[in-house]
Amino acid sequence: MTHVVLEYSLADTYLERRGEFRAEHLGLLEAAVERGELVLAGALADPFDRALLVWSAGSEDAVQAFVAADPYLANGLVTEWRIRTWNTVVGTAVPPAAGR
């Protein structure tokens, strides 16, 4: 099975500036979860320099649409981003024996 991973590189000022844009950003994420597109999302801590968003298989268009609408990206909280396919083998989001 595959998932799609969106990786964000976060600005040094991310923690100080995110509050202004957080409600809109979280709203976009929650809508993607409700549509069954987004599996997990969050920032890596200590240091808060990256965020990972894991999307369901076949969600490349949804990821592109999210990136285009995300206020974190539009307002410089995200300095770089990339989308990668993740070949997942084990976990609760992977059917038993898939990919083995």
Image (cartoon, rainbow, N blue to C red):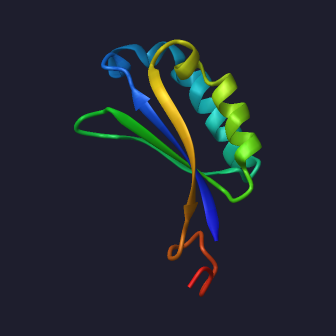
Q: Position of residue 40 (x, y in %)?
A: 54, 51
Q: Residue at x 30, y 19 (%)?
A: 12
User: Residue shown at 34%/22% (left/top)?
Assistant: 15
Give above or below for 34 relative to 66. Answer: below
Q: Tell how many labels.
A: 0
Foreground residue among 28 and 48: 48
Left or right, residue 50 beside residue 25: left
Q: Is residue 8 left or right of residue 98?
A: left
Q: Identify which residue, 81 or 65, lies in the foreground.
A: 81
Quarter containing the N terminus: bottom right
Q: Would residue 55 appear left or right of 34 to someone viewing this image?
A: left
Name the residue furthest left: 46
Give above or below for 98 relative to 3. Answer: below
Q: Is residue 1 above or below residue 17?
A: below
Determine the image quadrant of residue 42.
Answer: top left
The quarter in which the C terminus is drawn is bottom right
Residue occupying the point 68% across, 25% down: 68
Q: Locate residue 57, reporting x and y percent.
A: 69, 59
Q: Foreground residue, 41 or 83?
A: 83
Residue 39 placement (x, y as % from top left): 60, 54
